[in-house]
Image (tube, rainbow, N blue to C red):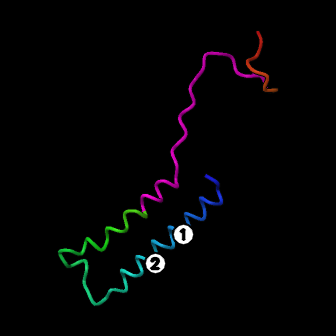
Amino acid sequence: MNPVLNRAVWWLNTAGFVFYLAWLASMNDRQILREQDGIVYFLPVIPFFFVYMLLIGPKPPPAAKEAAPPDDPAGNGPAAS
């Protein structure tokens, strides 16, 4: 993914997440943490975390150790013996 697009999606996701948490905090007429159905208000938070996990990307695989001689510095392939 393009780094500029990646950063833009990261900022939009963060802004949406903060906006949703601010909206939850502004619901002072209800005590959602003390209600039995209060967890329903927190379920929309889960997709924000999925977007963050997708933006992080996978780890690169570990480099395999080769028995062959290393490449020459000029980049012309394996060194001749």
Q: Let me know if residue 68 is in the magenta part.
A: yes
| 75 relative to 37 in the view: left or right | right
Label 2: few (<14), some or many (≥20) within 10 Å? few
Q: Mark 2 = which residue?
A: 19
| 50 relative to 75 in the view: left or right | left
| 36 relative to 18 in the view: left or right | left
In front of the other: 67 or 40:
40
At 65% from the left and 60% from the top, the residue drawn is 4
Q: Mark 1 = which residue?
A: 12
| 49 relative to 30 in the view: left or right | right
Main SS of residues in magenta: loop
Q: Let me know if residue 24 is in the magenta part.
A: no
The amino acid type found where label 2 is placed reads: Phe
In front of the other: 1 or 74:
1
Which residues are the magenta region? 49-73
The amino acid type found where label 1 is placed reads: Leu
Label 1: few (<14), some or many (≥20) within 10 Å? few
Q: Secondary structure at mark 2?
A: helix
Residue 23 at x, y percent in the picture: 39, 82
At 50% from the left and 67% from the top, the residue drawn is 13
As drawn, the residue found furthest toward the right would be 74
Of label 1 and label 2, which has the lower sequence position? 1
Residue 46 at x, y percent in the picture: 37, 63
Q: Quadrant of residue 78?
A: top right
User: CB under 8 Å between callouts 1 and 2?
Assistant: no
Q: Secondary structure at mark 1?
A: helix
Judge whether 4 appears above or below 58 on screen: below
Q: Quadrant of residue 12?
A: bottom right
